[in-house]
Amino acid sequence: MSAETLNFIIIDDSKLDCFIAEKIIRNTGKAGDVKSYMSASAALEHISTTPAPPANDKTMVLLDIQMPIMNGFDFMEAFEKLPEDVRAGYNVYMLSSSINENDLNRVKSFSSIKQFLNKPLTSSALAGILEGL
């Protein structure tokens, strides 16, 4: 990815985890727009109503699995029904403190999920994501 700055969307029902992730992202010096949502449905609404970013411009989505009302898997089922040009603008990374085998296998069933990461987000995990772009 040639862009110097990256946009991020953090989806987590924990204020503390959102705060930690945002701090780590901002400390990279590569963060453009960083939005945090404590509700997956609010984040989905934002993504589905915002014009698709240019093809070479990706927004990184850090998505928690365990959330009330709409969890990470519910979000992914809805996200994968969005038009291809919308989905193409996002790289989704699933975050969880769960190392439940069923969750890990379910993550693999979504083509839009780039990687599974353990919570809380660490600067080394984020560096690994950024190096892979």
Image (tube, helix red, strand yellow):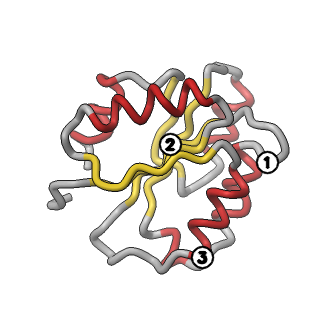
Residue type at tag 1 = Met
Residue 125 is left or right of residue 88, and the answer is left
Q: Which residue is mark 1?
A: 70
Task: Find disc 3 in the rendering and name its residue.
Answer: 49
Identify the secondary structure beneath mark 1.
Answer: loop
Q: Nearer the viewer, residue 36 or 4?
A: 36
Precedes in sequence: disc 1 or disc 3: 3
| The one of 97 and 100 positioned closer to us in this rendering | 97
Q: Is residue 115 above or below residue 42?
A: above
User: From the viewer's perspective, is residue 83 above or below residue 59?
Assistant: below
* Residue at 27% from the left image edge and 71% from the top image edge: 56
Mark 3: amino acid: Thr
Mark 1 → mark 3, Cα distance in angstroms: 18 Å
Identify the residue position indicated by label 2 in the image.
62
Count the marks: how many?
3
Cα–Cα span, label 3 and label 2 = 19 Å
